[in-house]
Image (cartoon, grey):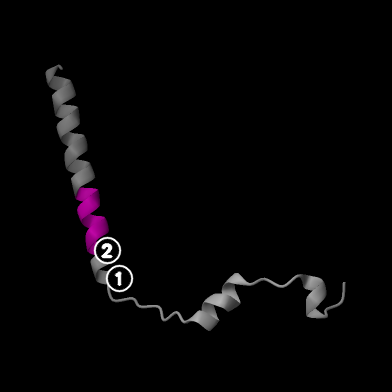
């Protein structure tokens, strides 16, 4: 591996490390405390789809 290749690998590793740190910080600030309450009824409402004809609407 030449000197330029080693330099490129080092720069890429630094950039990837910085990106991972930034993503981790963003998650820590904005997402960490987000909570979603899910109960069985709400989950069933989202998963069970009724066909349009069974809803009694106009075609």
Q: Which residues are magenta?
A: 18-26
**Picture quadrant of residue 37:** bottom left
Residue 11 higher or lower than 56, as above or below: above
Membership of 23 in magenta stretch = yes
**Residue at the spot x=31%, y=70% of the render?**
31
Secondary element at image label 2: helix
Position of 6 with respect to 44 (left or right) is: left
Say which mark, if any, is on residue 26: 2
**Picture quadrant of residue 50:** bottom right
The quarter in which the N terminus is drawn is: top left
Nearest the camera: 31 or 41?
41
Query: x, y percentage for residue 35?
Result: 35, 78
Task: Please report contact status of discs 1 and 2: CB closer than 8 Å, yes or no.
Answer: yes
Say which mark, if any, is on residue 30: 1
Q: Residues within 10 Å of mark 1 (few under 14, many from 20)?
A: few
Position of 55 with respect to 35 (left or right) is: right
Query: x, y percentage for residue 42?
Result: 53, 80
**Residue at the spot x=14%, y=28% of the render?**
7
**Residue at the spot x=28%, y=76% of the render?**
33
Query: x, y percentage for residue 55?
Result: 78, 78
């Amino acid at each position: 591996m030449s000197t330029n290749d080693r330099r490129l690998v080092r720069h890429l590793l630094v950039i990837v490390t910085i990106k991972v740190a930034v993503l981790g910080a963003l998650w820590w600030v904005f997402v960490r405390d987000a909570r979603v309450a899910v109960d069985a009824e709400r989950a069933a409402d989202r998963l069970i789809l009724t066909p349009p004809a069974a809803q009694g609407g106009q075609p």
